[in-house]
Amino acid sequence: MIDTTPKRLALFNFWIAFGSFALACVFGMYQVLERSGLLTFIQSPAVYFASVSTHGVLMAFVLTTFFIMGFGYYTATTSLNMPIWNPTLAWAGYGVCLTGVVLAAIPLLLGKASVLYTFYPPIQANAFFYIGATLLVVGSWFWTAIMIVMFGKWKKAHPGETVPLPMFATTANAYLWAWTSAGVALEAVFQLLPWSLGLKDTIDVGLARTLFAWTLHPIVYFWLIPAYIALYSYVPVAAGGKLFSDKLARVAFLLILVFGLPIGFHHLYMDPEQGTIAKFWHMVGTFAVSLPTLLTGFTVIASLELAGRKRGGKGLFGWIGALPWQNPMVLAAILSLLMLVLGGFGGIVNASYAMNAMIHNTAWVPGHFHLIFAGTVVTMYLALAYQLWPKLCGKKLFSNDLALTQLWTWFVGMAIMTTPWHVLGLLGQPRRISSVQYNSLLTLAWKPYELLMILGGLVLLGSAGLFVYILFKTQTEGAIEAQAVEETPLQSEVAVSLWLNNFVPWNLLILGLMLLSYGWPILQFFVLKTYNPTAWGY
Amino acid sequence: MNPNSWISKTRSELGLILQDMQIEHLEKNWIYLATAMIGFMVVILSIGAVFLHLNPPSHWETIDSASLHLGGEFAEDKLGVQPSKPSDVIIQVKLVAARYGFFPREIVVPADKKIQFRMASLDVLHGAHIPMTNMSTMIVPGHISEVTTVFPKPGEYPLLCNEYCGMGHDHMWSKVTVLSQNDWDARKNEGKQP
């Protein structure tokens, strides 16, 4: 039972998400070209840093938030088989988010907010940038509330039943987002907004960095969970098999929720203002949170193997060839997992405490997160779009072959771009420079890798264009499909105990862990004497 | 027994919890293996931290960035490689990070000796990194960063700013020359080095 409201909500959210994605890819192409120094007439730090700030905001905040909201509304209605609770609230949230994006976009595009998407003070942007970013977060809380209420309503109506896995995971993500966004919200409301509006002259930079680190790590799990929902709930069906273990999937989502939160200081390893013990504790948590990803890898690959063997695959690896590679969802899962393995190795290096000194803020870091986010996560977003567009529009996918081409080119482009990026980091190139100006022999070794990255950027831009073209064609010219029986994602059959069917104990556990991990690190800025700088331009 | 009594409810819940714990043996083996891998890595890092003192640079010491130039250890005449005796275990280097350079712009230090960098920012966030070495730290306005390292290989190294600090960020770097012990001693005898 899915009426037009969730379909419209999903489509409206998705178009903002993917429109921003395509635009951000254009900025990305400019950056890779500008940075290489190949064309001197496009060299400009002012344009580059405005572009990189916009690219980051569009990809990390706009694409993700709108996609996750749209996907959440769709998942809640299909998986729980109930209408959206309070659609007016959902549309209001959409409006608040969109207003925020427009308000932030104006200074960004005018070069008045070139503070990067991490907006590290004391460099100050135009106040509208902070107001816009805050509204985007506030609007997303409307979605958070709707997801949590729908989860509760369904459980009340179905006592003793197990909440379907896709909605269980979506609700886990809603809680995760509520916890995650609190850090940056506190920074915005108590520090950035009053400071940028001129109500306060100075800003405590150490506190701002600590609050941002609170958000900066778990936010990547907020982005990742929809990709994992696709891997658990859509991929096994698309491959012609079943999910290997529903229970382990729930455990993985809960572990992400709990361990994803209290670990943000691996972004501050090189900072003076946090102590050794806090950093060590966050390091242990960072390693712990790799467990759910290892479990996910196991369960998804096991599910694919079940499907491959069912389709006649023999031998140790024969099942891989027997998988339906022509199915976009299955292809995306395989490519996405490949990039997750490689990106995961890089992540272990980043997490490795003192070893982080070798790669901190070098080109290795964007290489890593492009592999994991733009690779693993976005690839699954693309596959979900191909899966859902026909259902949302009631039309056949414009071309399955083009969709496969698009997924392959995205993968190849990402491989061509991120491999040299990692190498550049190991060769010491800083991540946030617009050109190479150092008078040092070392920089000669950087040149070939920068040129190779242009090729990666070109392939990726072409792939992103193709993606939007396929969606547009599907919606406008796709053959009308007779409304078939609504295909629901994989549902749960097993009964599970309270522990795996609600979030109360886990939220309490998180509260304890957050107090332990962030209690003193935040309190110290209020207890100890700090000198706060005034605002600086750029 | 009444199925709605709290005893039967608890019993069925306990049954479900036991059922939750029953998982397929392959899954169980994988969980053990994954946990062991993660545990192994954490143990290695812990040994490094506790016994080899391999920790990231942490150092709580605040300073008023707006008045660095007015006096104290980061006044202009106090910067650079600090005077040392041959018996000193650590050589201290004081630098100010400011748009767009680390001041003084050129320093000379010996190889195979502990070098302690003390750095403060005059303006915004900066990051200091010497490529191919583990000399790395963020420089946060209002805080003093302290990082100690040993350079095993003599040569010329760039000290780069690796945190976006404004439109001139690309140009923010300084030169660090690492001399072999012999060259360092010779230079010292010539009276060039404090």
Image: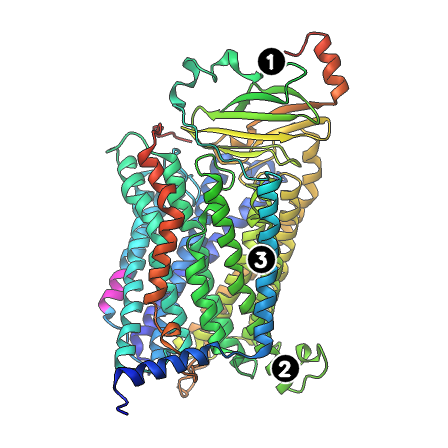
Q: CA distance from mark 3 to mark 1?
A: 45 Å
Side of A290 relative to B191 (left or right): left
- In the image, A59 versus A316, the foreground residue is A316
Magenta stretch bounds: A88-93
Q: Residue furthest top?
A: B191
What colour scheme has been applied to the protein in the rendered image?
rainbow
Of circles 2 and 3, which is in front? 3
Report the residue marked by disc 2: A308
Residue at the location (44% across, 32% down)? B60
Residue A457 seen by the camera? no
Look at the picture and state if A328 lies above or below A145: below
| Amino acid, disc 2 | Gly
Q: Residues within 10 Å of mark 2 (few under 14, many from 20)?
A: many
Task: Say whether mark 3 and mark 2 are on the same chain.
Answer: no
Quick check: is A91 in the magenta stretch? yes
Report the residue marked by disc 3: B39
Q: Which mark is residue B83?
A: 1
Q: Position of residue A310 (x, y in %)?
A: 62, 87
Report the chain holding disc 3.
B
> Magenta region's main secondary structure?
helix
Q: Secondary structure at mark 1?
A: loop
Look at the picture and state if A388 lies above or below B87: below
Q: In the rendered image, which quarter is residue B55 located in? A: top right
| Amino acid, disc 3 | Gly
